[in-house]
Image: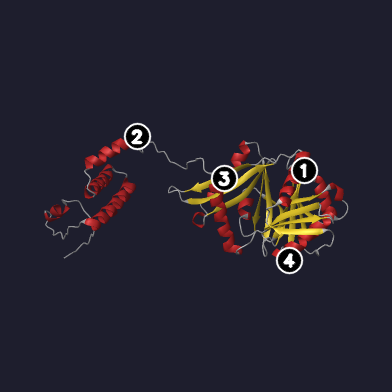
């Protein structure tokens, strides 16, 4: 006696056809969840056979399984056909072979930027741990408490990034600027453990002053804006606290001194004809279920596109998400006549990814953050 085990769902009349051939069919009737699972398995079986043969008979088998699935779920086949016809009228069928790659829609820039920033921050913490980004403002006064000058900046990955520095004209040449620099070097090392100070500026007279006072220039962006060179300058935080003048130091950017520095920077930009307008852009990538896969945030300023944030969720890495996001934001900039792109990235982040996209390193910072290198990269078309 031969026993052939099938263990699968078959058409309703198959047992009678087996018996008419003088054989014995052992069957049982299934229902509920077991029946639904069997129908789903049968659907996959018939689909596979259709894929192998592409014969009308195989398609008919698949059609019959779908009919049974509808009836088991409590729907008449006519009801399903009617619904299919309605959908076909309103949304079309599948006969034209239309493949939907993606949909572009206007997002909320602030919310999308926050999503990208949060994702990138979480990734950074997983590699380098928690980092503080404290801010510091230092003002120097004369004996009558008149403001002679001030300096301000923020800790960025164990470097102190200066974004405000000004000395009143009547006090220039008296060592006030050097005293502010030394104070910032001393305070940031003592308070935050910063090893270097970084100053990026386009003002020619300020660049000359920085070189004169011991700063090292490591790189520059030509024509940022047109006719200027945006230089990257660095100063080791090994200075002692200066005795010249009365120093007022505060953490945080609230207050009159920070506002005064901001106003002075705007005056200098206006004097040099430097446009400070900034146009921002986010590209957020989502899957069909609207789950965030990653994104990029950048802005156009002084005829350059700066890629500020790029993040791809761990589950989506290697799927081209970062590439698509970069292509979109670069295309956006090019459509506005921008051909110069730049960005900063850590060794533990995506330097090789950017290099594959045509970016090249123009500046390298050691121990930013400690134990890692940080790079500035550019791409020009």
Question: Residue 102: which disc?
Answer: none
Mark 4 to mark 3: distance in Å? 37 Å
For this rendering, which residue is in front, 247 or 342? Answer: 247
Of the two numbered discs 2 and 3 on the same chain, state the one appearing first in sequence.
Answer: 2
Mark 1 to mark 4: distance in Å? 31 Å
Q: Residue 224: which quarter of the image?
A: top right
Place of residue 378 in the rendered image (x, y in percent of width and height, measured from the top left): 68, 48
**Location of mark 2 (residue):** 90
Q: How many marks?
A: 4
Of the two numbered discs 4 and 2 on the same chain, state the one appearing first in sequence.
Answer: 2
**Would residue 88 be found to the left or right of residue 68 on screen?**
right
Q: In which quarter of the image is the N terminus?
A: bottom left
Of the two numbered discs 3 and 1 on the same chain, state the one appearing first in sequence.
Answer: 1
Residue neighbourhood size for the residue with mark 3, other residues' Cα within 10 Å, grouped as few (<14), some (14–19), many (≥20): many
**Location of mark 1 (residue):** 268
Of the two numbered discs 4 and 3 on the same chain, state the one appearing first in sequence.
Answer: 4
Mark 2 to mark 1: distance in Å? 60 Å
**Location of mark 3 (residue):** 282
**Location of mark 4 (residue):** 190
**Would residue 24 be found to the left or right of residue 162 on screen?**
left
- Asked if marks 4 and 3 touch (Cβ < 8 Å), the reply is no
Q: Residue 54: which quarter of the image?
A: top left
Give the SS element for disc 4: helix
What colour-coding does the image apply? secondary structure
Residue neighbourhood size for the residue with mark 1, other residues' Cα within 10 Å, grouped as few (<14), some (14–19), many (≥20): few
């Amino acid at each position: 006696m031969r026993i052939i085990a099938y263990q699968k769902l078959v058409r309703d009349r198959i047992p009678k056809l087996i018996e008419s051939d003088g054989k014995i069919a052992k069957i049982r009737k299934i229902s509920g969840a077991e029946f639904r699972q069997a129908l789903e398995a049968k659907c996959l079986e018939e689909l596979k056979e259709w894929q192998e043969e592409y014969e009308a008979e195989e398609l008919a088998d698949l059609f019959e399984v779908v009919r049974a699935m509808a009836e088991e779920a409590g729907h008449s086949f006519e009801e399903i056909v009617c619904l299919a016809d309605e959908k076909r009228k309103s949304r079309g069928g599948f006969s034209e072979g239309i493949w939907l790659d993606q949909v572009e829609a206007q997002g909320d820039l602030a919310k999308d930027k926050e999503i990208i920033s949060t994702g990138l921050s979480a990734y950074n913490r997983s590699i380098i741990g928690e980092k503080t980004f404290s801010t510091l403002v230092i003002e120097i006064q004369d004996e009558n408490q008149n403001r002679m000058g001030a300096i301000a900046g923020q800790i960025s990955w164990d470097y102190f990034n200066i974004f405000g520095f000004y000395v009143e004209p009547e006090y220039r040449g008296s060592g006030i600027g050097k005293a502010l620099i030394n104070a910032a070097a001393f305070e940031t090392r003592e308070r935050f453990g910063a090893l270097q100070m970084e100053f990026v500026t386009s003002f020619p007279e300020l660049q000359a002053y920085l070189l004169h006072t011991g700063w090292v220039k490591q790189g520059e962006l030509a024509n940022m804006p047109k006719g200027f060179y945006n230089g990257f300058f660095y100063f080791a935080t090994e200075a002692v606290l200066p005795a010249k003048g009365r120093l007022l130091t505060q953490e945080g950017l609230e207050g009159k001194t920070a506002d005064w520095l901001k106003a002075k920077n705007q005056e200098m930009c206006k004097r040099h004809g430097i446009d400070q307008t900034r146009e921002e852009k986010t590209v957020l990538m989502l899957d069909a279920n609207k789950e965030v896969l990653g994104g990029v945030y950048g802005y156009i300023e002084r005829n350059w596109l700066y890629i500020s944030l790029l993040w791809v969720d761990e589950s989506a890495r290697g799927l081209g998400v970062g590439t698509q996001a970069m292509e979109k934001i670069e295309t956006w900039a090019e459509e506005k006549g921008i051909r110069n792109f730049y960005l900063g990235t850590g060794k533990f982040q995506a330097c090789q990814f950017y290099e594959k996209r045509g970016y090249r390193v123009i500046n390298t910072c050691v121990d930013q953050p400690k134990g890692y290198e940080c790079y500035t990269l550019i791409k020009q078309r």
